[in-house]
Image (cartoon, grey):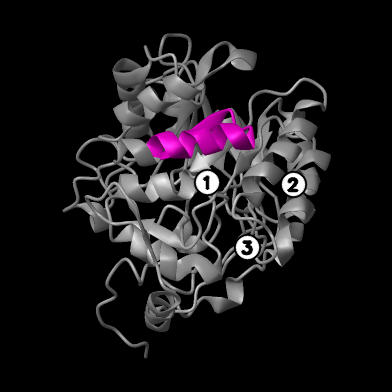
Amino acid sequence: RYPKGKHPSPNEIGANFYPLLGPYSSMNASVVRTHFKWMRRAGAGVCVVSWYPPGRADPAQAASIEHSDKVVPLLLRAGEATGVKIAFHIEPYEGRDASSVAKDIRYLVDSYGSSPAFYRSSAHGERPVVYVYDSYHTPAHEWARVLSPTGIDTIRGGRYDAVVLALWVRGEQPQSNSGIEDFFVRSQFDGAYTYFAGSRFAWGSNPANWRGLRKATRRRNLLFCPSVGPGYIDTRVRPWNGGNTISRREGQHYDDVFGDALAAGPDFISITSFNEWHEGTQIEPATRIDDIGNAIAVATAAVDDAIDKVTADDNQGSWRGKGSSRRVPLSPQQHSGWSALLPKYQDYGELSPHYYLDRTRYWVRRFESSDDRTALPSLHS
């Protein structure tokens, strides 16, 4: 139904926006340093990393060296240098159950818990915070084995105790929050997060339902963490999914959902996402459409040269050739030639490439000024 073929980088990537850094690897130290500086600019206190335990990588990444656990030491070093803390978003993997998640938490604490950048919530007994994606696929009584203080494999009451958040999608009936209190009472999770950046995806991710979810969690002394995002579009990787696209509306959607999150009285707010480019939820700077040809030319050089270019104050219309220490002008003809090869990308419209970083900082300040709140996590995909 849909055409297939090769899509060579850097002119074709699996995203509807084009990164200001060009295509990059999250294993690259220079890229990570730049990302963490941008997170600090945004006011984010915590980077929540999508994580698989060793040997349990996403099948799509099985042949890749970019295993999510291998990048953790690099992220921790960047966090120590910038003041950004690291928390973990445990992804689904074959054979995952409550006991394996307890094992994962013990591994994370033993392997990385000594780093100053390993996030521990001061408001919750200096315990680490762990997000468990698709937690609802495991029955509540199985979670109780590891999350109840009396469970046979409990993590409670010792060095491995953590704030463990479950993904809340919907209640026992579609389009309702029925059953949420019973699930949390029986499972012994510490709270709920909603993750999805699109209100159409799930009952829990719809801002209209957040006040009800907050009331339900508060009755049981549980934490509530709504997730906000600037928009959603994934048609570059899921061409059939255009019906779920959510327009950024020149930043208005981000303002709307952030305002709704604050109004619900949350304990945490998470952002989906810092750099999930495939789903168009990123707040990371994106290249302007008019500059994409130039960005691709930069991307053909070494990634450090690309970073030099985008962090320079004013070098528009030029790029540094690989292995060269001088700036080589990019002619209008060359620029037009690149543009002719490009798929149609989007940008942030009249907003600057860094707009969503700075707008996030505005909302972080609003969040921090409301009662006594903890640091704001930012989901780093």
Q: According to the image, label 2 marks what residue?
A: 258
Above or below, 306 against 161 in this view is below
Q: Is residue 48 magenta?
A: yes
In front of the other: 30 or 191: 30
* Distance Cα–Cα, label 2 vs label 3: 18 Å
* Distance Cα–Cα, label 1 vs label 3: 15 Å
Other-residue count near label 3 (Cα within 10 Å), few / some / many at <14 / 14–19 / ≥20: many
Give how far across and how far down residue 69 sits, in percent: 28, 35
Above or below, 205 against 103 in this view is below
Mark 3 residue element: loop
Q: According to the image, label 1 marks what residue?
A: 274
* Distance Cα–Cα, label 1 vs label 2: 15 Å
Q: Which amino acid does label 2 sit on?
A: Phe
Other-residue count near label 1 (Cα within 10 Å), few / some / many at <14 / 14–19 / ≥20: many
Q: Are marks 1 and 3 in contact (CB under 8 Å)?
A: no
Mark 1 residue element: loop
Mark 2 residue element: helix
In front of the other: 362 or 146: 362
Q: Quadrant of residue 231?
A: bottom right
Q: According to the image, label 3 marks what residue?
A: 348
Q: How many marks?
A: 3
Identify the residue at horizontal 43%, vertical 19% (top origin).
Answer: 80
